[in-house]
Image (cartoon, rainbow, N blue to C red):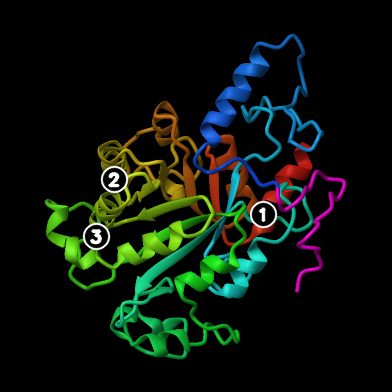
Amino acid sequence: MPETDSETDQPDGNGAGSTDRRNASILNRRQFVAGAGAAAAGSAVVGTVGASDGNGETKRGGDARRGRGPHEDRATVIAHRGFADTYPENTVAAFALAARGGSHDAAPQRGADWIELDVYPTADGDIAVFHDADMSGLTDTDGLIYETPSADVFSAEVLESGQTVPSFAESMDAIPPNVGVNIDIKAGAPDVQFGRVADPDVERDAWQWLETVVDTATDHRNELLFSTFWEGALATVRDIAPDVPAAYLLSGSIQEGLEVTDEYETAGINPPMDMIYGTPFFDEESYEPIDLVAEAHARDLPVNVWTVDTWYEAEQLIDAGVDGLFLDYPGIVRWGALERY
């Protein structure tokens, strides 16, 4: 187990704070940064003017090079499948460990501000947390997860780790209420259409299982964001719970992603790293020359980028103005934080 006190998590001298005080919400970070920037602009004090962190301490001021306001964290840290290359992905143990640690990028162990997990129905209609449709690649059990009985799904061992595929309810119970949960909705049937569909209502029955997901999620006190590549799933969540925040996972076209964002009034934009214009990673052969960060921020929406694997990628994306980073390794934000502070 990591050597950290998950209950107290005392400051480590580099700004790490209590696990009870996490980063600005993935959903309100844009408003926080904009408001803090306006306050700093109106102040007669120049330099490291900061806002109170709620514990009587002053946060460090904005970084002019990165254009950040007075917020102690430079981007929301989202544990992709519970930091998938650090712990056995999408397991109860991974979620519990991902939530432990400091709330500052320079902490020796960086805890997640949010945790991302994936959901599927089992053949019995229970909700499992797992990424792939086929269980054979990551577990000791074969078969499509939505065609496999619950007993077999929940007894399947993940990556020889001793951890088994958890239920969604177990996973939510393992995540502290001060840590947000990004619920990635996967296809629970073979005949639903990826991406946009002509008439989402035609698929409504195939997405009926999302009622259980929404009910389970909203029984907990965590902040929530439902995200998906499937428009049918997005439309269903909007129909079941119009006030629950949701986001479309962009794929193939930036313009299409913006159209879905506007049509469903989503709460965020979650693109792949190679969609971020102006970075070394932008794929100009695949995507339109659209500054997605600028478009999102004009809508007052956060941009949360997947999946970031190196310190260099993290720094380039933060410089480009992204708001959240889906990470498999929490420590990759440490270099930039130590350099800055």
Q: Secondary structure at mark 1?
A: helix
**Residue 118 x/y as whole percent:** 43, 66
Q: Main secondary structure of the magenta part?
A: loop
On whether residue 6 falls in the magenta region, the answer is yes
Question: In the image, 170: left or right of 205?
Answer: right
> Which residue in the protein does label 1 denote?
332
Question: In the image, 138: left or right of 19?
Answer: left
In the image, farthest residue toward the right: 13
Residue 20 sits above or below residue 216 on the image: above
Q: Given the image, on which type of amino acid does mark 1 rest?
A: Ile
User: Which label was assigned to residue 194?
Assistant: 3
Q: Given the image, on which type of amino acid does mark 2 rest?
A: Ser
Q: Earlier in the sequence, mark 2 or mark 1?
A: 2
> Which residue in the protein does label 2 denote?
253
Question: Can residue 320 be seen from the camera position used here?
Answer: no
Q: Secondary structure at mark 2?
A: loop
**Residue 40 x/y as whole percent:** 67, 18
Q: How many marks?
A: 3
> Does the CB distance between marks 2 and 1 fall below 8 Å?
no
Circle 2 residues within 10 Å: few <14, some 14–19, many ≥20:
some
Q: Which residues are magenta?
A: 1-20
